[in-house]
Amino acid sequence: MSQTAALQHLSAADAVLAALIAQGPAIAPRAHEDLYLALLRAIVSQQISTKAAAAIWGRFTALFRPEGYPEPRILLEMSEDDLRQVGLSRQKAGYLHAIAAYNERGLLDYEHLTSLSEEAFTQHLTAIKGVGRWTAQMLQMFALDQPDVFAEGDLGIQNAMRRHYGLETTGRALQKEMVALAEAWRPYRTLACKYLWQSLDQKTELEPLTV
């Protein structure tokens, strides 16, 4: 269905979302096919601020002259110490190597991964060391722009829903409430999440995952 149909559905299904959508600005789909690059950037961005992630990503890509593209074979030839010099932790350096190796084995094929269900996609990606459920969801939502993914474990989504829906619980109880509320958003939960992130008045994970 079209973006217009999705917005109409969400606005009709949920008065809170209707208000957030009306406040804008509009969010347009921006999927891209380079899952390998998106995955590298997601790992670089984990657990650090948007500003820090952008700086480290810039230094990381500068290692790959002249194009700035981290070709898997070249990345695998770099030592962890090489990668730590640009601001990556030893742990993240290892994760980037694991992603490059996975890609070299042909396991990040766009056509194949886009054909998988949400759960199968998550299982496939979490086989990579350092990649968890949250990272898999971010790729589905931003790199693939799949329409019906709900990131109940994301801190930003939790904060937005606590703020806008008056939720006072925490932990699993909070996530259970969130999942119940989000049922009305199907099959457009991804777009709903993007408007919730936007409502936080701060940059979301959309920036680190785009190229």
Image (cartoon, helix red, strand yellow):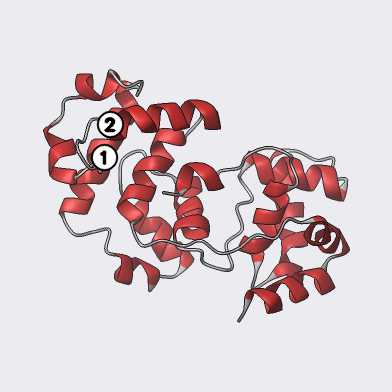
* Mark 2 burial class by Cα count in 10 Å: few <14, some 14-19, many 20+: some
User: From the viewer's perspective, is 97 left or right of 204?
Assistant: left
Percent coordinates x, y for residue 3 in the rendering = 64, 73
Q: Quote the CA–CA distance across marks 2 and 1.
A: 5 Å
Q: Which residue sits furthest bottom? A: 1
> At 45% from the left edge and 54% from the top edge, which residue is drawn?
139
Residue identifier under label 1? 68
User: From the viewer's perspective, is 187 left or right of 60?
Assistant: right
Residue identifier under label 2? 62
> At 53% from the left edge and 44% from the top edge, which residue is drawn?
207
Is residue 92 depicted above or below 102 in this figure?
Answer: above
User: From the viewer's perspective, is 94 left or right of 203?
Assistant: left
**Mark 1, secondary structure of its residue:** loop
Q: Amino acid at mark 1?
A: Gly
* Mark 1 burial class by Cα count in 10 Å: few <14, some 14-19, many 20+: few
Percent coordinates x, y for residue 65 in the rendering = 19, 35
Percent coordinates x, y for residue 56 in the rendering = 39, 27
Percent coordinates x, y for residue 195 in the rendering = 71, 55
Is residue 130 visible in the rendered structure shown here? yes
Q: Within the image, what quadrant is residue 26 found in?
A: bottom right
Q: Earlier in the sequence, mark 2 or mark 1?
A: 2
User: From the viewer's perspective, is 37 left or right of 179?
Assistant: left
> At 60% from the left edge and 81% from the top edge, which residue is drawn?
1
> At 49% from the left edge and 25% from the top edge, which residue is drawn?
52
Q: Are marks 2 and 1 in contact (CB under 8 Å)?
A: yes
Is residue 173 depicted above or below 58 in this figure?
Answer: below
Q: Amino acid at mark 2?
A: Ala
